[in-house]
Image (tube, rainbow, N blue to C red):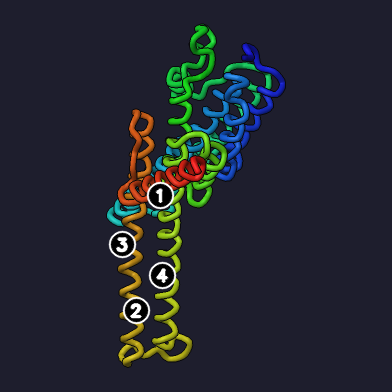
Amino acid sequence: MNTTPTTEDRIWAVLSHLSSLAFGMGILLPIIGWADQRRKSNYASFQSLQALGYQSLGYTIWILSYLLVIIATSFVMLVVIGRGAQTGQNTDALLGPWIIIIFVVVFGFFALYFLLPIIAAVACALGRDFRYPIMGDRLARYLRFGLAQETEDSQWLDEDHEFRWVVAMGHFSVIMMLWGMLAPLTTLILYGKQSFFMKFQSAQTLIYQSVTTVLYLGAGFLYLFGFVSLIALTGFTGESNLNSPMGIFGLIVFGVTLLIVVGIVLLVPLMHILGQWAGYRVLKGDNYHYPIIGNLVNRQISQQLKRDKEEKLT
């Protein structure tokens, strides 16, 4: 076991942290780095898992922060516009300072998100034990990083917690549209044959995220279909006739598709929340099952393992 970071350790740590700059697409690299180094170097393993957590949890926090900024911005603009209408003041003059403040906050968060992994990469390149604010020390205790090097009976990181952390980050990454599926897919490929827990959790997470993504993209397609149908059936290319049978049918088609889209738009955030809950439950020690999907995947994997065992016996 390495007690000081070697060149290889530092390279993996640097690459894992810098993969955050890919803004979602790089989430597979920390998992690969952890899988390659987990029984070679605690340093590289910990830094890779920390980088994985930063990408998954950090992206989630970043998205939620921007939603809060958007809500706050909308509220402030409504208040300023209302005040301007009452007093007769120039609305542009009132909104000017607020727009500057919002601009600084938005791009400040954006810059901070990319600055931290760069600092982490530089620190790891120098062989230092970098810790992200808030998350780093907690993860070190969770994985027994540091303690693992002080006791002979546990010289490596806590394996069960390693697995749970990787799986949980796959659940949390549901909010990363498309790219979030790379986390459970990479885990399934690398550790699907070595751990039933990893295989089951990664498989159900991959399917769950696929369903969420299909629903999200399907909502966009349905809206486009309804809008195009409305244009085609009401004759917007020339003189429109909404009172004709075709025009009324077009309005009905658009209305139905719009209702379905609204339902999906309301459902997808709930599915994101369920993914976050699944990750939390896994970290707390549960073998979490998604509704319906979890039981189906568990049954399929169990049957496959049973068939494989029977084939070996024969």
The kind of residue on which mark 4 rests is Leu
Q: Please provide percent x and percent y for residue 198.
A: 46, 36
* Numbered disc in front, either 1 or 2: 1
The kind of residue on which mark 1 rests is Gln
Circle 1 residue: 300
Q: What is the distance, in whole Å, between disc 3 and disc 4 at their CAs?
A: 12 Å
Asked whether disc 1 touches disc 4, contact meaning CB atoms under 8 Å apart, the reply is: no
Nearest the eye: 295 or 101: 295
Circle 2 residue: 253
Question: Which residue shows up at 60% across the image and 37% down it?
Answer: 29
Question: Which residue shows up at 44% across the image and 23% down it?
Answer: 134
The kind of residue on which mark 3 rests is Gly
Q: Quadrant of the N terminus?
A: top right
- N-terminal of the pair, mark 1 or mark 4, is 4
Which quadrant of the structure image shows residue 32?
Answer: top right
Decide if residue 99 is in sight here.
no
Q: Please provide percent x and percent y for residue 96.
A: 45, 48
Secondary structure beneath label 4: helix
- N-terminal of the pair, mark 2 or mark 3, is 2
Q: What is the distance, in whole Å, between disc 3 and disc 1 at their CAs?
A: 30 Å
Q: What is the distance, in whole Å, between disc 1 and disc 2 at their CAs?
A: 39 Å
Q: What is the distance, in whole Å, between disc 1 and disc 4 at their CAs?
A: 32 Å
Circle 3 residue: 263
Secondary structure beneath label 3: helix
Decide if residue 314 is in sight here.
yes
The label number, if any, that marks residue 45 in the structure image: none
The label number, if any, that marks residue 222 in the structure image: 4
